[in-house]
Image: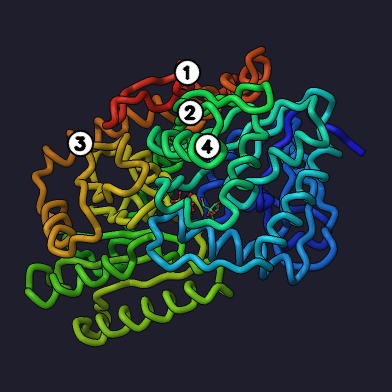
Amino acid sequence: MRQSSLVVVANRLPIDDSVAPDGACEWRRSPGGLVSALHPLLRHSPATWVGWAGGTGPAPTLPDVDGVHMRTVPLDHDDLRDHYEGFANATLWPLYHDSVEQPQHHRRWWEAYQRVNQRFAEATAEVAEPGAVVWVQDYHLHLVPGMLRAIRPDLRIGFFLHVPFPPPELFMQLPRRAELLRGMLGADLVGFQRAQAAHNFAQLVAKVLELPATDRRIGIDGRVVRIGAFPVSIDTAEMAALAARPDVAARARRLRQDLGSPEHVILSVDRMDYTKGIEQRLKAYSELLVSGHVKVRDTVLVQVAVPSRERVGQYQILRERVEREVGRINGEFGRVGEPAIHYLTQPFGRAELAALYRVADVMAVTPLRDGMNLVAKEYVAARVDDAGALLLSEFAGAAAELPQAYLVNPHDLEGLKQGLLESLHAAPADVRARMRAMRAHLHEHDIRAWARSYLRALDETGALVERLTSGGDPATPAVPGQPDRSGTPTGRPTEP
Ligand code: ADP
Ligand code: F6P
């Protein structure tokens, strides 16, 4: 069994389910924040990624990808239904996103969650070198740090939550709240997107487990667990380079022509998820068409909504409702060859996404709640021309770092309409000044800065940080530390 000094553990592997007949496979760049965040880091690194390859049945053996070893963890039909679609995506996901949909609780789901987390912990224990650093990702795997520590106390274990961590009054609803908290505390370092989330966690640990806890450190079993905020980011330089390519700029010009050369293009790019505020956005747009503030002749909306978690009831209902509404709006306001909304459900390559970002005069990113939202950051990185207005929800983690965006409360329909109009008609000089400031922020606070700050806190020897984040990128900054709105530094841990 091959072992590595760095092991990333995430629900999904970052590669496509479909392996070519010759056995070759490629990085998947699936439409999801976690893979987008970690992909640029691990490329060409001698690490192992432990995860699920999608589908059910025996785990396929996959070839290494760009030097990264893939260790697959199988899920059978019951695991898929009860762990992934059930506990992870119908209990925790809605609960962690302000309960915008009702979280469901079933004892069978909890059993599956424990079983699958144990399987991930055992697979990780097999592939980790003595003393290795293990980095566990996200809400599917809350129990892995504790389970792994029980098998392999020699490991240095980090846990990072990509989604919001809710306030105590919501988390307390969970029948298995104590077990989940204890699972995370198996880590040496528990990282969140926002300082508020670390605060929520500390409060819950003190209340539920009656352990000594501050927003920086928690004592358990004679160990200290450090906690902190590490806002995740993107490969800013890569997206900027892509967007600056002549073929991408040409593609953007062509896209504008294909859209009928309108005065304004509004773009939204989401996974089809009820947290993304797609229905609220469509309603706002539709009302602006009704009132005549927006005219199909001048303005088009491009809504990209790639289907996600398609067997989960709440997602099926959402898709039906969104598609019905898009159909209604196009039926009512579109003309032959001039739809009001261009609706696309396909996954796109990075170059096509970059071209879409470059064609968008307004990028509407209006989730009801989002851990970070990398699409907002990608848009900013892609606007190498300093043009383009970002309309951003106050409830996206990105809003704390990008206060120069046109900020809106997506629950406030009138406010959303106002925000759309303001960003559509903003003075070019204002748009440029805002975009320039946001680009400067992301130039420093990129994915390498995120990894550097997290791994430096986890692996105090610094060796791992050097290996993963050095080389090739002149934009690689020192550890950042600008204050967010709560006054807490972002981009580095709240130091214990
Ligand atoms: P989430 O993690 O909830 O999916 P994020 O906005 O943080 O949301 O991350 C979404 C990621 O998926 C981004 O990197 C984005 O570029 C990518 N993505 C979204 N839609 C598509 C699509 N249609 N095709 C390809 N990539 C997509
Ligand atoms: O960040 C939330 C998240 O669950 C990520 O872990 C993942 O990349 C993305 O949403 C897509 O979700 P799924 O893996 O369920 O398709």
Q: Which mark sits nearer the N-terminus, 3 or 1? A: 3
Look at label 3 and name its amino acid.
Arg
228, above or below 313, in the image: above
Please tell me whether mark 4 sits on a helix, a strand or a loop: helix
Look at label 4 and name its amino acid.
Val
Q: Which mark sits nearer the N-terminus, 4 or 1? A: 4
- Residue at image position (31%, 49%) is 395
The quarter of the displayed image where residue 257 is located: bottom left
Numbered circle sitting on residue 277: none
Position in image of residue 11 (x %, y %) = 66, 52
Q: Which mark sits nearer the N-terminus, 1 or 2? A: 2
Look at label 2 and name its amino acid.
Gly
State how far apart marks 3 and 2 are (Cα). Answer: 29 Å
Marks 2 and 1: in contact by CB < 8 Å? Answer: yes
Please tell me whether mark 1 sits on a helix, a strand or a loop: loop
Please tell me whether mark 2 sits on a helix, a strand or a loop: strand
Query: Along the line of sight, which residue is nearer the eye, 445 or 462?
Result: 462
User: Which residue is disc 3 drawn over?
Assistant: 434
- Residue at image position (25%, 58%) is 410
User: Which residue is disc 4 drawn over?
Assistant: 205
